[in-house]
Image: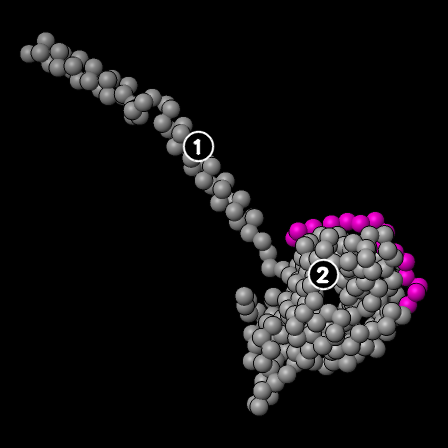
Amino acid sequence: MASSSSSSTKKAARLAAKGTSRGVKFQGGTLFPLIVALVVILGLGTVVYARQSIPADDITSPTINDHWHVGYGFYICGEWYTLGGELEETDSQGRLVNTPYLQTGVHSHNDGVIHWHAFTSRAVGRRATLGVFFDVYGVEMTNERLKFPDGQPAEGIRGEEFIPGETQCDGKDAELSVAVWNNYTDTGDGIRYIANFENIRIQNDGMVFAMVFMPRGEPVPTVPWAANLPALGAVDMGVTIPTELDPDAQPESDTESDSGSDSGSDSGSDSESESDEQD
């Protein structure tokens, strides 16, 4: 009996030793768990990157609380023009009816001044571009052409289209550009943009823009009425956002002006505006 008991004890010891030596093994060796670990790490990294990459709300100026005034004019073959049209027209109940104006709050009073008083986020921050102003008045200014709608009062631009390489100024080929002055008191050459006009940003109050169609090398004077910008802009300083509008909603001049100031000079170095922003 003693011998049998000793034998049983040894078998139990051997089985116990085998049990402790065995570990959990993955089919395919150590490669599979490494792949799983790598996938988990990459997944976590992607989540962290995505969280950090979500763009913040655009809080750059102009905001809905700003009311800026920007001088502008179209200088075409040596003549100055401004846009006409009453955007603040109302119906019988006193409600605004002009959709582009309601969507942006951007307008003019036939005076060569852009009143930038954003009603919605469509016209704030980096969205505040010349393209917004053009759209409100139905003007198309691309790298290929400058086109005015039929409803413009001024005879020189009403329904007219100016195309580089086709339309001429006094028998000379002309080209499109935009001259920009950062302040209405500037009397220098400004900055000349030769492309991507709709993306040129409205960056501060008191800027001045000249949309130009002239032969290459011809001087572009400063906008004649730019010096009067503060007085012209005071017309509607008290305007408020229409009560029926949600400011956070995301919707999808009637006369020619004589060329006045001779103090301007031709613009300096040309440059293309950035596709997304103007630094």
- Mark 2 / mark 1, whichever is N-terminal: 1
Quarter of the image where one finds residue 203: bottom right
In this rendering, the label closer to the viewer, 2 or 1: 2
Q: Residue at x 68, y 54 (%)?
A: 143
The numbered dot on residue 38 is 1
The numbered dot on residue 263 is none
Q: Is residue 231 visible?
A: yes
Mark 1 lies on a secondary structure that is: helix
Q: Residues within 10 Å of mark 1 (few under 14, many from 20)?
A: few
Q: Residue at x 77, y 66 (%)?
A: 74
Q: Residue at x 16, y 14 (%)?
A: 11
Q: Residue at x 86, y 72 (%)?
A: 258
What amino acid type is highlighted by mark number 2?
Phe
Q: Indicate whether 75 appears above or below 9.
A: below
Question: Residue 147, image x and y in percent?
Answer: 68, 64
- How far apart in space, not on screen, are marks 2 and 1 (Cα)? 60 Å
Q: Indicate whether 271 appears above or below 245.
A: above
Q: Which residues are magenta?
A: 261-279
Query: What is the image's colouring?
Result: one colour
Quarter of the image where one finds residue 220: bottom right
Q: Nearer the viewer, residue 51 or 246?
A: 246
Furthest toward the bottom, the residue is 92
Q: Is 154 a magenta residue?
A: no
Q: Is residue 119 visible?
A: no
The numbered dot on residue 162 is 2
Judged by its main secondary structure, the magenta piece is loop
Quarter of the image where one finds residue 242: bottom right
Question: Residue 128, image x and y in percent?
Answer: 67, 63
Mark 2 lies on a secondary structure that is: strand
Does residue 108 appear to the left or right of 92 in the view shown?
right
